[in-house]
Image (cartoon, grey):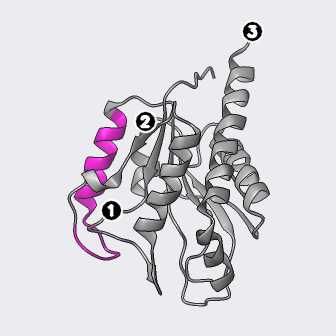
Amino acid sequence: MERSFKVIILVDGHDRRCIGCSVENFEEHTEVKKINALVISMLPSAVYLSSDIAIGGRGLNCPSWTLSWKVRIINSLSPDLVIETHLNAFSDSKVSGCETLYYPENDNEKIAKMIQFEIVSKIGNRDRGVKAREDLFILRRTHCPTFIIEPLFITNPLDRELLKTPEIIAQGIVSAFKELKKYFHTVNSP
């Protein structure tokens, strides 16, 4: 299967109305925006889609129609690849690490492993691996390979320390984009 790699979209996982998890002075939405802004400053060819454009509810349970609206915008831009950035959370504060979620089709698992490897290599936290998810709306409904990255657990004190140097996380994402660009170039070469 031939794929090009021209339009990359980086998406904030939450917005100011649906902030995600909040621990101490850290809000998932605010921290993700910082990370993604750094990625864009290092990788200006990427398209940045701030989730603040979506209208939604407050808290963790955002209305599904806001996700639908986000997916419509993404699909209208006809990207080759989408990465949505989140921060993971769990009730047990000992749970830590990075994981990448993907929709199980075509070579998405291979791509997810490349993304995961690059991020973990840069930030140095626990590798929780890649996970196929058919139930997540954005993964199911976008018209291109889409991945959700969860570089750390905001609920884990050691992982949370990484948020004090978001440049490291951003470098991991940029490194993943660069490796993916090489991969797609090789796949498309005669």
Q: Is residue 100 left or right of residue 136?
A: right
Residue drawn at point x = 62 percent, y = 83 percent: 156
Q: CA distance from mark 2 to mark 3?
A: 25 Å
Residue nearest the viewer, comparing 11 with 134: 11
Amino acid type, residue under disc 1 in the picture? Asp
Amino acid type, residue under disc 2 in the picture? His
Earlier in the chain: of badge 2 and badge 1, it is 1
Amino acid type, residue under disc 3 in the picture? Pro
Residue drawn at point x = 47 percent, y = 87 percent: 24
Residue 15, disc: 1
Residue nearest the viewer, comparing 53 with 148: 53
Q: Position of residue 110 (x, y in %)?
A: 71, 43
In the displayed structure, 149 sits above or below 145; it is: below
The residue carrying mark 3 is 190
The residue carrying mark 2 is 143
Earlier in the chain: of badge 2 and badge 3, it is 2
